[in-house]
Amino acid sequence: MITLDRDPTVPKAEMPCGHVITQDSMTQYCRSILKQGNFIFICPFRGEDDDFNGKGCEEEFPYYMVRHVACLDPGEQHEIENKIAENYFNRKSDIRQCPGCGNYSQRKKTSDKQVKCPVCSKANGKKYYFCWDCLGEWGARDHSSCSMVFALRYLNGCGTKDIGRVKGCPIARACPNPKCFALIEHKDRCKHMRCPNCEISFCFVCLEQKDKSGNYECGGPFAVCEIAPIQNTFA
């Protein structure tokens, strides 16, 4: 059961994974997911039985089912679907929101830092460009260090998630290797991570690296450890 309401008279919906949830619980869960900056709804069940062994269910709820169980009225549906779209675009690596008009633009090449907004260009009667990394108007400053600005802004605004029994861990981290700092996003499963860039192994929760003997001081893949603060510097 994935609801705090134990009243047997309150209607509950059985989800595809077999867990049940009330209308109010689904609505609260939906808003919580969106507030964290996410747009995918994963079954929030956490259990200690033989099937889950302290891990989460991890079954994805399709949005049409979330909408149906939560019994969203037209106003709520409009609000939530707009937030889903906003979170999706904010998390897409090839899409940015134009600082001039608020519309979303996609760059032609992954190496492009100077991006033209067709909406602003048409409205202003001249070409309007913005920086892909810092989202400032192009030419208003030196943009050589903007990738670092983007990385820090992304880490501070990425939202949080539960990893195993650890609640409220940042969704994204920078690799703790001081020679790397690649941005990494946690998708699913345990807290142990290998950087795809430099290939060091570290804990996504506390950011401690694997020791020379190949072990983690913070324990096994689903052990609870202290959450390292959001990274605000790469020094």
Image (cartoon, grey):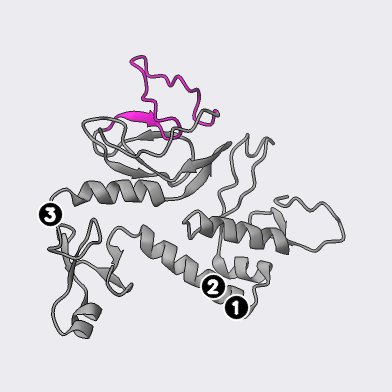
**In this figure, which residue is indicated by the disc labeled 1?**
75
Q: Earlier in the sequence, mark 3 or mark 1?
A: 1
Distance in Å between CA atoms under marks 2 and 3: 38 Å
**Could you tell me which residue is drawn at 60 percent across and 78 percent down?**
75
**In this figure, which residue is indicated by the disc labeled 3?**
142
| Residue found farthest to the front | 140
Residue 71, percent from left and from top = 68, 72
Residue 30, percent from left and from top = 59, 60
**Could you tell me which residue is drawn at 17 percent across and 48 percent down?**
145
Residue 212, percent from left and from top = 33, 15
Q: Nearer the viewer, mark 3 or mark 1?
A: 3
Q: Residues within 10 Å of mark 1 (few under 14, many from 20)?
A: few
Name the disc covering residue 79, or none.
2
Looking at the rendered structure, the kind of residue marked 1 is Gly
Q: What's drawn in magenta, residue-wise?
A: 199-223
Q: Is residue 73 above or below residue 48?
A: below
**Could you tell me which residue is drawn at 64 percent across and 47 percent down?**
45
Q: Earlier in the sequence, mark 2 or mark 3?
A: 2
Asked where in the image residue 11 lies, by quadrant, the reply is bottom right
Callout 3–callout 1 Cβ contact below 8 Å: no
Q: Secondary structure at mark 2?
A: helix
Callout 1–callout 2 Cβ contact below 8 Å: yes
**Residue 193 visible in the picture:** yes
Residue 57 located left or right of residue 102: right
